[in-house]
Image (cartoon, rainbow, N blue to C red):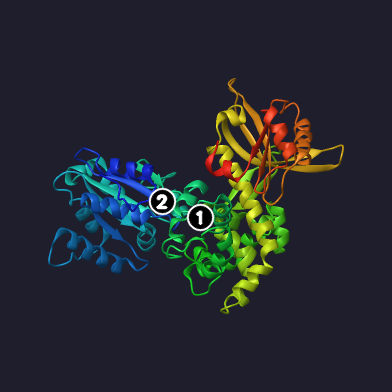
Amino acid sequence: MDKPQEMFDRNFEWAELTRFTALPGPCATLGVVSGRRRQGKTFLLDAVTRANGGFMFTATETTEADALRQFGEALARYRGQPTPFRFAHWDEAVTELMRIAGNGPTTAVIDEFPFLAKASPALPSIIQRALDPTAQHTNTPVRLLLCGSALSFMGKLLSGNAPLRGRAGLELVVPTLDFRLAAEFWEITDPRTALLTNAIVGGTPAYRREFTQGDTPQGPDDFDAWVTRTVLNPARPLFREARYLLAEEPELHDTALYHSVLAAIATGNASRGGIADYLGRKSTDLAHPLSVLQDVGMITHEADAFRRNRSAYRIAEPLLTFYHSVMRPAWGDLERPGRAPAVWHRAQPTFRSKVVGPHFEQICREWARWHASPQTHGGHVSRVVSGTVNDPTAKTSHEVDAAVYGDTGDGRDSLLAIGEAKWNDTMGIGHLERLQHIRALLTPRASNTTRLQCFSGAGFTDELRHLAESDPTIQLIDLERLYHGE
């Protein structure tokens, strides 16, 4: 099947879905598709079912009886029957669904599956029974795809002792677009504008199409105006999206608490202790909310590159960071039309320090992990993380924005490079000397061959550029190299 022309990228996802839906064989098979909201999962699955004449049912949050009625009506329309099916329970509905493939493999999609399972907890077990080898003689070659955005639920669907454990022939996660693909999708050619935009909306495809109706910043001179007319405009859907993201997650019952945790992280509190101090709570009280936020994909938890007893929490969705740093403190003003330009002007220092700065560091780590060549690092990369290095003599510590680990050929996990990222600073000899000092502190983990990487959104001094030209262990990465180089 040819991928629709209007579908941007998603080549891997399209290839896997079309492979699965065309699998030969007489038996029914199961696939699971998940991913955060607004990533285009429904668009993908709808395109697949249209291309091969399959059946697709999108569930709503309702009762079991109403869900069965809706499902029966949808299945009857697909089968071309004048009257809808009247299913008394899901056993009947699933049995009928497994009979729709009369002439070879046929796709059947149940979108928003968590809504159905919430109203009918036995549904996964019913599907498991229908897929059991002893029941396959009554089935047709249906290629059943279950899709959902509730990451915690979808993650448990095939794990542990879950009924569908070991039954799936496809487990596809639809990710957000990375920063390079996001720039291409938004059709932004200026790297600085692309990164600033990505710091607000990330790589979520729907934020360009449905939420801004294709309104994109036309360049550096248009960026501020774009923010005020789209993101900070109370008449646009993107304005309240950050609030809805939490409200839509079924696992997040106390949204006020979860918003407070996210606000603490957005303010710069990356440790559990720091978050607890910000909220005025005990550190032990935050184990559950932090775990839930991780499960639903709102935050990440990363171990320190150099200290095993230290870790950092980060917000995974840029729009949430922007909301809690810029919008939430001025929400009353922003709700009144015409106040956005003044709020945005006052928020510039916060935007640079709390939003763009940390996001730029994350982009630099992503580039080092997925886009830089082995020659840049002096080996093949296995992980890139941030970390803290103790300096006993000076009685202080130093932050390393990117610690690049990898395999140099001897099979050991080696420190290939350390890097510093500065969004708004022109980097010079002083920044290089700081990295050299940290490299010395890391001996014997680091050596003179450990690369020193300077990431800058504002450029480098001529003196630093001259040194880098003659020393391959010094790597300078500007915005142009981040978006187009290795």
Q: Residue furthest top?
A: 410
Residue that extends furthest to the bottom in the rendered view of this protein? 336
Report the amino acid beneath label 1: Val
Q: Is residue 383 above or below residue 287?
A: above
Q: Taking 336 as reference, is 170 above or below it?
A: above
Neighbor class of circle 2 (other Cα within 10 Å; few <14, some 14-19, many 20+) is many
Q: Residues within 10 Å of mark 1 (few under 14, many from 20)?
A: many
For the N terminus, the image quarter is: top left
The residue tagged 2 is 34
- Left or right of 135 on screen, residue 171: right
Which residue occupies 61% across, 73% down?
331
Q: Position of residue 92 (x, y in %)?
A: 22, 58
Corner quadrant of residue 288: bottom right
- Three-letter amino acid code of the residue under disc 2: Ser
| Image x and y of residue 90, in percent | 27, 59
Q: Position of residue 124 (x, y in %)?
A: 34, 52
Q: Label 1 vs label 2: CA separation?
A: 11 Å
Residue 45 in view in this figure: yes
- Callout 2: SS: strand
Secondary structure under tag 1 reads loop
247, 460: nearer the viewer: 460
Residue drawn at x 26%, y 66% as measured from the top left: 70
Q: Which mark is residue 296?
A: 1
